[in-house]
Image (spheres, rainbow, N blue to C red):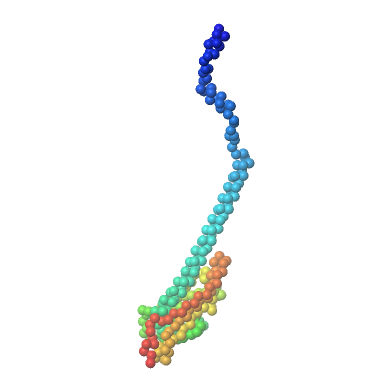
Amino acid sequence: MEKANKKLNKGFTQLVDFGDAIELRAKSASPKLTTGFTIIETMISIGLFVIIVVFGTGALLNANLVHNKTEDQRSIMDNLSFIMEDMSRNLRTGYNYRCYDTEIWIDSQDPQSDSLDDPLDCFDGGVIVFEEAHGDGAEDATNDQWVYRIWQDSVNPTKYNIEKSTNGGLTFVQMNLEEITIKDSSGFEVIGAKPPIDGDFQQPLIKIHLIGEIKYKDIITPFSLQTTVSQRLIDVENAP
């Protein structure tokens, strides 16, 4: 019977199950690599990543620190610029300039005396008094003069500050920040302060020079600023 079946199937194609064919083909195919990273490779990758993060964070923090220092120093320089602008603007529009040496102001000048209205030249003064643009130039008005002065610090005698008064020298306000130290070589120079009636035909001219240093977080930056201001009002137009 078996021989008969063999003879019967001899002339026909043998049917193969499709699932068995796929499994057979998968077994006969060349094996593919399916392995992952080893422990050593993983540790090396993590180590490199940590190193990059540490250096990147350090660079970022350093850049932020430099930025903050730059901003702080810029604020200090802006304060100096404000001081020069404030003095230049008010002196330009003022009149009746009276310039003193600092020691003379300390020893003999009464801030409320009538002499504040008397113009006076100087070549190396530490105090300048003048009538503000809207001030009363009358001789009996002794508390409306404005004053700028280079003054010794009350706490640190080696440091000088720029101070301002708007009431004839009764009270003063410090203009510079604590990080700014003004040297005593700073000051004012005034020429042509007296009116033409006194024989002075020079238009009033004021030179301001500020010398000092900025100390910020143990970093010392010296500076030297100078500007020249001419009185806006013409006082020589009636000169002979």
**Image quadrant where residue 115 sits:** bottom left
Q: Residue at x 52, y 23 (%)?
A: 19
The residue positioned farthest toward the front in the image shown: 11
Where residue 147 sits: x, y (%)? 44, 79
The residue positioned farthest toward the top in the image shown: 1
**Image quadrant where residue 91 sits:** bottom left
Where residue 176 sits: x, y (%)? 48, 71
Q: Nearer the viewer, residue 44 or 169?
A: 44
Q: Residue at x 60, y 42 (%)?
A: 42
Q: Residue at x 44, y 74 (%)?
A: 85
Where residue 51 sits: x, y (%)? 59, 50
Q: Quadrant of the C terminus?
A: bottom left
Q: Quadrant of the N terminus?
A: top right
Q: Vertical placement of 223 versus 98: above or below?
A: above
Q: Vertical placement of 231 versus 31: above or below?
A: below
User: How many marks do you count on the picture?
Assistant: 0
Whether residue 9 is visible: yes
Whether residue 119 is visible: no
Where residue 79 sits: x, y (%)? 47, 70
Q: Residue at x 59, y 30 (%)?
A: 30
Q: Vertical placement of 18 versus 53: above or below?
A: above
